[in-house]
Image (cartoon, coloured by chain):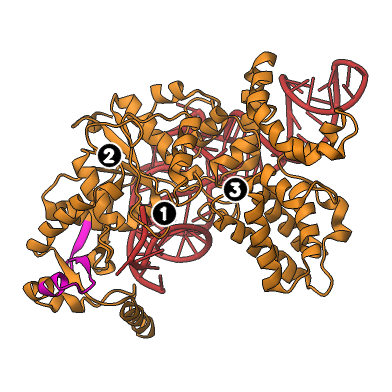
Amino acid sequence: MADDTQRPVRVRVAPSPTGDPHVGTGYIALFNYAFAQKMGGKFILRIEDTDQNRYRADSEAAITDALNWLGVQWDEGPDVGGDYGPYHQSKRTAIYQEYCEKLLASGHAYRCFCTPETLAEIREECKAKKINPPMYDRRCKAIDAAEAKKRADAGETCVVRMVIPRDGTIKFEDRLRGEVEISASQIDDQVLLKSDGFPTYHLANVVDDYLMEISHVVRAEEWISSTPKHVLLYQYFGWQAPEWVHMPLLRNNNKSKISKRKNPVSIHYYRDIGILPDALRNFLSIMGYSFGGDREVFSLPEMIEGFSWERVSLGGPVFDQDKLRWMNEQYIHALSPEELADALIEWRYNRERMVQIAPLIHKRIKTLSDFASSTEYMFSGDVDYAPFAEKLKIPEVPKKDLWKGLLELVDEYDKLIGFEAEEVEAVSRAFCEKKGWKPKHVFGLLRIGSTGRKASPPLFETMAVIGKDICRRRLRELAEFIKKMK
RNA sequence: GGCCCCAUAGUCUAGCGGUCUAGGACGUUGGCCUCUCACGCCGAAAUCCCGGGUUCAAGUCCCGGUGGGGUCACCA
């Protein structure tokens, strides 16, 4: 990798704290980390919290915990500090505004006063005229800059857009694919600064990567089509662009980009069903990457030792749950019986867990030995619905409406920030209300779906203990099961 | 739809012009081991998307097609 040594390697992973810690984030973090380690460089964690609408307070900690759990460690980040901070983009707004001013001054950007409604109209018009791709018509670019500034200073809401050349083409070198060339006509005048004063990804990302001296941008393939905007930004600022490395996207079984609709994507889910962190890490390591020889089971240090971009393959790897389980089996078998015992205790057979479960089964067991059989579904992954096939219905509700409805409910659960019994109940009751379905029917289904039993302790408390990720997975499986029933 | 990326068994991959009658792994499957089950071991079925070139020689290089994916937000 001689060509990677021109400047000190500094790479970053830049998750957005908008939800659960995503396996894709772990995947990209892993490759950034391995590369940095291999090159004796630095790995940085930066929090891209510029979307105030989607921001979730609990998400950042969940992400850092999950990444640590996976075994990747950053040299600089919001929690560990560093010389290039702050590492939260929300704390850097003044910086972005300052650089945005420069772009405005050099004529590489302009203020746009169009309302969301106007933008929607323009998009409609493009669609009607079959203009591909639909783009902003740049009408505000015609406004005199001084005039625009006056209007903005007077308090009129506006955004700042970057100027994209009318024609020509933007080229860049992707480390894994070689030269990629995209026509300027395909690129919209991207919004750089939102009306709330926060930057969009494109601006913040480029400014931060420059200021943090990022040498290689290792990110997912979905960013390829917006890379020209970034390349242009580097040009406008007169900065040296980093090397681009676009990793393939993790996929669902049908090859589409991995999504929570078709796969559990939260790292928490895998932790909760008892996947060992190193096993998940190893599994992610063989996604689009080969260790060499015929080895698939290898440690992180071993991966780092032989790490090379040449070993990355570009076909999108399907995230195969079966193979993950097999990988996990390898790691479990490598444990000594004592270590396995410790892992079990740390995982779920601990006091904290017992304290959560005890009140639920307290009055339902006659001997302590009844515990295991009465709580088995609190320690398992998927459950079996086949024994309840006859019960998986609601009077007057067509099968199709039923499983689709279930999926809608799961989406409602997805939106929950926590997963306390009260919230789950509120959402569930609201759902019944909306559908006009009787709670007793819906809750019966939820009980079977989340526990694999027709009897259990109070449903919502039980669901809360089982946990959000596993409940969502099980209910999606239930919907799938119902869909396939004849 | 425009543009871009990709293309070896159902899945993850090795292969970087001849050693490929394509190797490994998951899954599937047959058997062995064995008090059961699992592990382990041995074996099997299953792949180079199609068509043109280039070359003495192509899974490997080039072009076209097809297929899949991504992206077209005041989300990242």
Q: Amino acid at mark 1?
A: Tyr
Q: Nearer the viewer, mark 1 or mark 2?
A: 1
Q: Is residue A444 magenta?
A: no
Cα separation between marks 2 and 3 = 30 Å
Q: Chain of mark 1?
A: A
Indicate whether A340 appears above or below A399.
above
- Percent coordinates x, y for residue A300 in the rendering: 46, 25
User: So how many labels did they put on this image?
Assistant: 3
Residue at label 3? Answer: A264
SS class of the residue under badge 3? loop
Residue at label 1? Answer: A55
A183 and A430: which is toward the camera: A430
Q: Amino acid at mark 2?
A: His
Residue at label 2? Answer: A216
Question: Mark 3 and mark 2 in contact (Cβ < 8 Å)?
Answer: no
Q: State the residue at coordinates (45%, 51%).
A: A56
Assign the N terminus of chain A to one quadrant of the image: top left
Q: Residues within 10 Å of mark 1 (few under 14, many from 20)?
A: some
Q: Colour of chain B?
A: red
- The chain letter of the orange chain reads A
Q: Is residue A160 magenta?
A: yes
Q: State the residue at coordinates (53%, 56%).
A: A256
A203 and A440: which is toward the camera: A440
Assign the C terminus of chain A to one quadrant of the image: bottom right
- Of labels 2 and 3, earlier in sequence is 2
- Percent coordinates x, y for residue A42 in the rendering: 29, 29
* Residue A272 visible at all: yes
- Of labels 1 and 2, earlier in sequence is 1
Do the dots labelled 2 and 3 sit on one chain?
A: yes
B47 and A224: which is toward the camera: A224
Magenta residues span: A150-170
Indicate whether A121 appears above or below A308.
below
